[in-house]
Image (cartoon, rainbow, N blue to C red):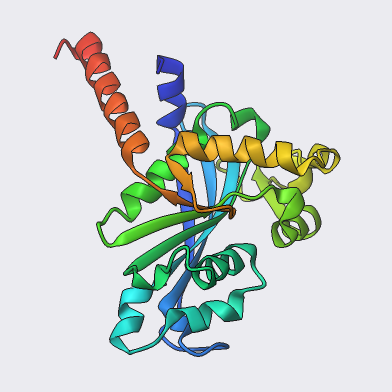
Amino acid sequence: MNDSEYTLWSRITFRTTEYAKNFDLINKHESFISEYTGTISEINISEQLPPTVVGEYGYSIWNIGLAKEFKFDISKLMKKYRFEDGYSEILKLKSDGVHDFSKIKTLVILHQLVLHPNYKKKEVVQEFIEHIYRAYYSDDVTILALFKPIQDNEIDYDYFYNHNIVRIKKDLFGPDGYTDIKASDYYQLNDLKLKTDLETNELKLFSLASKLGFSRIADSHMFVFSSDRIINRMKNKFEHVAELNKITHGK
């Protein structure tokens, strides 16, 4: 870790929107699920510039323990969402007898993350995983993540290539000055269309998953999180701050 890396990480922020309800709208017992989408930004306060959009993410929280209090099998609800890759893989793992996630109290499922290429090699992904770990730290929480190339993820592919727009604000204080850019252009995703070798694409993602502290579950695209790597990284950051304070303040 060097000073420039730490400076960048200290400017990274996460803005999350929660979609939750206390009643069922479409599917029975869906009120046990909360959906989240968010934006990763680099704040530019000292430069008096608007935040730079770094990336976007999506995840869901399944309150399995509370569902059990009402004697409801959460897997029945998950079958309603099996058209999404993550949920279909979780259901297959259960049907194959590999893992039964219904025994978990709270399940956090990370299913979407995209970054601007300028930030891909600067450990912003690690910052995001630390953010999730901090937010949902508990012995009762299990964090899963779907690691599947966007070229082979039909829902994400359609969303980022055909529907999603990134709104850029150019003036920090002015009321206007927004520019809308197609997400596929802003995140420079079009080159990925040419990378069709599934094995190579998966190997890259699986390698990243391992660096983040995730372990693959059987032969699926679902990975389960272990906190050791992120905790060590957090300790290194705290030590770096302590060293900076010694240099700056002599203590």
**Depth check, front residue: 87 or 187:** 87
- Point 48% across, 33% down: residue: 211
Determine which quarter of the picture holds residue 102: bottom left
**Depth check, front residue: 194 or 161:** 194
Q: Is residue 107 left or right of residue 49?
A: left
Q: Position of residue 73 (x, y in %)?
A: 42, 84
Q: Is residue 91 left or right of residue 144?
A: right
**Depth check, front residue: 181 or 47:** 181
- Point 45% across, 87% down: residue: 29
Q: Which quadrant: the C terminus?
A: top left
Say whether residue 98 is visible: yes
Q: Position of residue 215 (x, y in %)?
A: 46, 45
Determine which quarter of the picture holds residue 237: top left
- Point 39% across, 87% down: residue: 72
51 over 17 or under it: above or below: above
Q: Position of residue 155 (x, y in %)?
A: 71, 62
Determine which quarter of the picture holds residue 104: bottom left
Q: Position of residue 124 (x, y in %)?
A: 50, 35
Q: Is residue 11 left or right of residue 195?
A: left
Q: Which quadrant: the N terminus?
A: top left
Q: Outermost residue toward the left?
A: 251
14 over 70 or under it: above or below: above
